[in-house]
Structure formats: structure tokens, C-alpha cells
Image (cartoon, rainbow, N blue to C red):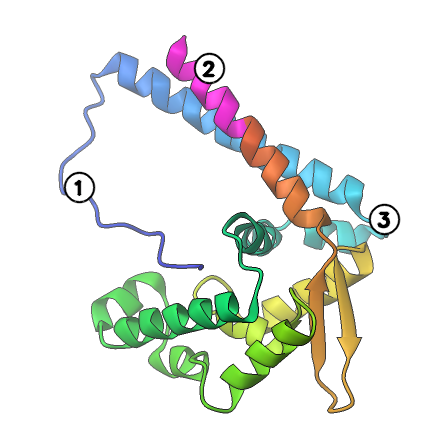
Amino acid sequence: MPSDRRGKGTGSSLDWAADRQIAADLELIGELRRARQEFQQEICSASEDQNEDLQELLRSDPMYEFSEFFYLLKARGIETADHIKILAEAHNEYLAELTNDDLKMQRIGLKRDRLLLAIFTSDTLPRLIQNWRDQPGAIDQSNLGRLLVTIMSVETTRKLVVGASRAGFLHRDKTPYGTFVVRSTGKMEDVYGRVMRGLRLNLTKLKEA
């Protein structure tokens, strides 16, 4: 799901004399900034806890990507245990490919050891599947960290899980084994989805203008 978003460069310099293109680029930047600001305002407003420190966490870039992850789960129809198994297998394939590409790992700032720990094994994959089978949408907190490994650290994931739980965006339940299982309440992906819908419609209007 999360992946390396830093595509290869074009290898050519920007044409700074292309006034119409620069103007269009500036409009795009403006829309992207407005969308990010709208997300920050909406996610903070939706929080059940208006604590200042929590609000700061909700406004952070990792929270934006965290919400995007849960939005993608819902938007792509990840609903059954078979679906989450397919996602985990694709995740493993991507990480295996990544660990064999030193230049790509260096470019996105990831270490091989960290990626290897995030690969689902014969021990962790069955738990991921069983949690989802028992309660669709439920993910062990450590497995969530694995799925998000390419975009944030395990500690950042933990902080966001705790914060999102306080905000009313996640259910976070402790199991008899001392682990935590989390499940979205649907609020943060709804905020993210509405902001993205608005951004897309605004960009369409700009293109037609």
C-alpha cells in the first residue's frame, strides 16, 4: 500500500521561460497547500479531544499519511481476510525487492535491517489474517507498523495510534497477550477522502478554465 513515492527524475532542467506552465504549477501548489491546510483543520475539528499537544500531532505530516493509509484500505475495498492476506503478500514482495536495491534504499532513507523486520513471516502473517477474520479492519499495532514501514518509523506509528485513539479515530484494545489491536472508527479516512474529493474537483476546474 504505502510505497516509494519518489520517482526517478526526468534528467532535464525546468524551462523557467514557460510562463503558462509556471503559472499552472503555481496554481497546483496553491491547491495542494489549501488541501493540506483543510485536512489539518478538519481532522483537528473532528477530534473528540481538543488537547493542544494532541492537536499538534494531528496537524503533523505523519498524521496525513496515516489517514491516507486507512483511506486506501477502504477505497480499495480491503474487507476480507483474503484481501488482507493479498495485501500482506504484496507488501512482502515489495520489501524483498527493495532490500535488493541498495541505491533505492539509500534514496528513500531506509535500512535493510528495518525492512527485513517489517516483512510478514510465518509467525506474524497468521496473526494479521486472524485478527482481520475475527473483526474486519482490526490490525495488531505491530503489524500496522510493518505495513507503514516505508513512510514512518515504528515509534511514530505508535504515537499516532495512541493519539488517534484519544481523538476517537481508532479503537485500541489490549489483548490477553499484552499486544494492542486497533480498528478505525471511519472518521479520519472520511476527512481525508472529503479533502481529496475537493482537491480533485478544484483541479478539474483549473484544467477547464
128 relative to 59, above or below:
below
Amino acid type shown at disc 2? Lys
Which residue position holds label 2? 205
Give the residue at the far top of this rendering: 209
Which residue position holds label 3? 50
Q: Which residues are magenta?
A: 199-209
200 relative to 191, above or below:
above
Q: Earlier in the sequence, mark 2 or mark 1?
A: 1
Image depth: mark 2 or mark 3 in front: 2
The residue depicted at 36 percent of the width and 24 percent of the height is 25
88 relative to 53, above or below:
below
Residue 177 lies in quadrant:
bottom right
Q: How many marks?
A: 3
Amino acid type shown at disc 1? Thr
Give the residue at the far left of this rendering: 12
**Is 83 left or right of 162, judged from the image as shown?**
left
The dot on residue 10 is: 1
